[in-house]
Image (cartoon, rainbow, N blue to C red):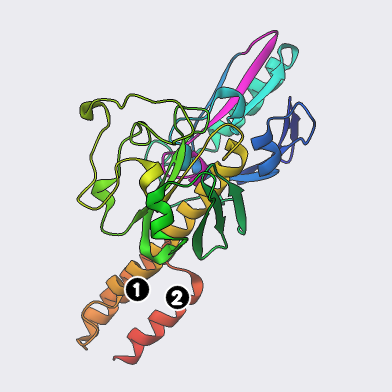
Amino acid sequence: MGDVLAGIHATWEFDTDSVLIRFERGIRTPKLFQSLRERRVPHAALSSVTLTPGKRGTVVLRAVPRPGADPLVEAAAGQLKDGCDPYRLVLPAEREMLAEYYADELRARLGPDAAEPAERFLVAAPEAPLRFKAYDGRAGFDGHRVSFRWFWTGASTAKWKAGDQTFPVTELSGVEWRSPEAFEGYLRLVPRGLEASVPGPGAGEGPARSSGPDLVAEPDAARGPQPMAGRPTRADQDPAAVVFGLGYGPVHESLPFAAAVLESVRRNHSAAVVPAAVLAGAGRRDPADIAERIRHLGELHRAGLVTDDEFSSKKAQLLAEL
């Protein structure tokens, strides 16, 4: 389309295959938007487009991302308030007809799989290095590993005994972010092999820090899945987690951090699994089998699960077996 639609706090630039969202840096702009700066959203990452009345003489154009397409949305897990939703463009009501035009244009460009969850992330995650200050420690991510450095004024005895922590993304299976705007927010890493032990959203609750008031823990039924033996239930006791507090771990710092870690974990997991699947049965030299495996490799490449370099390298290896 090649057009620009300027709204409140953001401007959308419409390209033939994507929408470039540029966020303003004004004092009234939500800090999350200022932190993100800009995001390119492929049409393939969208499931629908809506236009609804807003508050105080405005209309809201919203592009709805497909589940699994955006690491930021996946990490947020529905916890973002409307005002911090990066897919909402607020416009004056007098621009409703123009907004409707662009909404129709975007709907016409939605892909055939718009109603289906995305198989991989299609929107780029915030770039590392990233860091933020939590209540009980400082969290850092360099693109390859996550580090937690504890504060003696906030960290629990359990964390001090465990010592500062470093987690290579190759040893993680995911990350859980609970908004600092909710009760007892935290960022929690999920080591491989403990996927089933991740506590539910209420898991960070309970008597958290000695300096705060006594809190009453929720019943187990309200907490969701409980951790396996050796996995602390509360985030303030878990060396694989940092907890938030007033002024600690704000959304605009901790959420991009969680999204970047999640994207890196998924990418490394795919890189480790896909080549192994492609090369399964490499000792066999039947030409028909080699041809079938090359065809399958091509499908993975077209789906974006194998990079150009991986495709060329693995194809050469398969051809060498003939």
> Residue most toward the right?
26
Q: Would residue 38 be seen by someone viewing this image from the given angle?
A: yes
Q: CA distance from mark 1 to mark 2?
A: 8 Å
The percent coordinates of residue 63 (x first, y second) are 55, 31
Instruction: Tell me if 86 is positioned left or right of 229 in this view.
Output: right
Q: Which residues are magenta?
A: 54-74
| Rendered image: mark on residue 310 | 2
Q: Quadrant of residue 43?
A: top right
Q: Nearer the viewer, residue 257 or 217?
A: 217
Q: Which residue is mark 1?
A: 275
Image marks 1 and 2: residues in contact by CB distance under 8 Å: yes
Q: Nearer the viewer, residue 279 or 162?
A: 162
Instruction: Look at 50% across and 76% down and name the residue there.
Output: 309
Q: How many marks?
A: 2
The percent coordinates of residue 225 (x first, y second) are 23, 38
Instruction: Look at 58% across and 36% down and name the residue there.
Output: 251
Say whether residue 282 is magenta: no
Amino acid type, label 2: Glu
Q: Quadrant of residue 218?
A: top left
Amino acid type, label 1: Pro
Instruction: Look at 32% across and 71% down and name the residue there.
Output: 295
Mark positioned earlier in the residue sequence (1 or 2): 1
Other-residue count near label 2 (Cα within 10 Å), few / some / many at <14 / 14–19 / ≥20? some
- Badge 1 marks a residue whose secondary structure is helix
Q: Nearer the viewer, residue 265 or 11?
A: 265
Q: In the rendered view of the protein, which quadrant contains the N terminus?
A: top right
In this rendering, the answer to whether 290 lies above or below 140 is: below
Q: In the rendered view of the protein, which quadrant contains the C terminus?
A: bottom left
